[in-house]
Image (cartoon, rainbow, N blue to C red):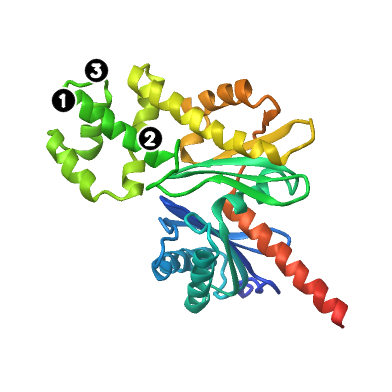
Amino acid sequence: MPPPSAGPPDRPSTVLLGGDAGGSHCTVVIGTADLKVLGRADGPAAAMKPGAAAASAAVLVETARRAAGLAGLDLPAERAVIGAAGAGRPQEQAELAAALVRTGLARQVRVVTDAEASLATAFVGGPGILVSAGTGSIAYARDPGGRLHSSGGHGWQVGDEGGGYWLGRRALAAAARAHDGRGEATTLLARVLSALGVQHFGEVVRWASTATPAQVAALAPHVLTAAGEGDAVARRAVADAARELVDLVAALEQYFPDAGPIPVAMTGGVLRPQSPLLGAFGERLAAEVHRARLVRNMIDTPVGALKLAAEEQRGVKKRREKKA
C-alpha cells in the first residue's frame, strides 16, 4: 500500500502578521518570530481615513485570510503590526487597531505609519532617513538615539508634495492648459485622454470631479514616462517633485547633529528603479544635502511590520520570564 499522504504542517507555536495598508494596494504577510514568511497576499487599497476604520479593516482581514490560507493556517494570529498610510495620528491608529481586533485578524494589534514599518527594514535598526513617495509623500528619520521624527505626510488636501497624487494633479493641470492653448505643447493632454479612455477634455473634467486620490495618483506614471521621453512640461513636473522630496530630507537633517554621513533610503511607487524621478531626486539630494548618502537597501514594508511584531513578541516573552 502507498504511504498515507502527509497532513498539513503543524501550526507554529507563535503566528505573527505584518501588513502594509497603502493608498493604492495592501500587502499582508504571515510569519514566525524568526521572520520566516509562511504566506503573502496582496489586496486593494486599505489606507486609513478618518471615520473609516471598519472599511480598511475589512480589506486587510480579507487579504490576511488569503495569506493565511497559503500558509495552511487560520486567523487570528497571535500578534500583528500594520503599517498604514493615513494613520499618522494616535486616534486613527487606535481606531484601526480596535477594528482589526474585532475582525479576528490577531489577538493583539498595533497600527503604525507605513513609513515606520518601512524603517524597520531600511537601516537594520540603525539611524537614517526614509523617503516614501507613493500616492502621498512623507519622510521619516530615526535619529542616532533611536527617536523617530517625520516631515510631510499631511494628506493630499494640504500636502503630500512630490507624491503620486501631486504628480497626477500636475498632469491634469498641464492637460487643461494645453487644451485651452494657455501653455506650451505637451504630450500629457493625449496621455491623460488615453489613460482615461475618453476623447474630449470635458470628460476629463467630469472624471476629476469624483476621482479618488488613488485614481489621480494612477496618472503619475504617465508623467514619469513623458519626462523620460523628453516632454519639457513633464520634466519640469519631475524636477519640482524632486525638489519637494529633497526638502523633506533637508527638514530632518537637524536630528543628526554629528558631522558624519546620513543614510537615505527610498520607497514608494514613484521612486522605483528606472524612474526619472529617482534620478532627479538623487542629483538634487547630492547638491543640497551634502551629508546624505543614498542606500539601495530593499524595502519590504510588510516584512518590516512583521519584524516589529516579532520584536514586541520577544519583549512580552522576556517580561513574562522575569516575572516567573
Residue type, mark 1 in image: Asp
Q: Position of residue 239 (x, y in %)?
A: 45, 24
Residue type, mark 2 in image: Leu
In terms of depth relative to the viewer, which is nearer, 45 or 51? 51
Q: CA distance from mark 3 to mark 1?
A: 11 Å
Q: Is residue 120 above or below residue 267?
A: below
Left or right of 237: which side holds 64? right
In terms of depth relative to the viewer, which is nearer, 282 or 63? 282
Left or right of 57: which side holds 303? right
Q: Is residue 91 above or below residue 139?
A: below
Residue type, mark 3 in image: Ala
Q: Position of residue 240 (x, y in %)?
A: 44, 27
| The quadrant where residue 208 appears | top left
For the C terminus, give its image quadrant.
bottom right
For residue 180, the mark is 1
Give the class, few, some or many, for how many residues have Cα within 10 Å of label 1's Cα (few <14, many ≥20): few
Which residue corresponds to mark 3? 185
Q: CA distance from mark 2 to mark 1?
A: 20 Å
Give the class, few, some or many, for how many residues have Cα within 10 Å of label 3's Cα (few <14, many ≥20): some
Give the class, few, some or many, for how many residues have Cα within 10 Å of label 2's Cα (few <14, many ≥20): many
* Residue drawn at 42 percent across, 64 percent down: 56
Left or right of 162: which side holds 222? left
For the N terminus, give its image quadrant.
bottom right
* Residue drawn at 24 percent across, 17 percent down: 185
SS of the residue at dot 3? loop
SS of the residue at dot 2? helix
SS of the residue at dot 1? helix
Which residue corresponds to mark 2? 167
In terms of depth relative to the viewer, which is nearer, 321 or 38? 321
* Residue drawn at 58 percent across, 55 percent down: 302
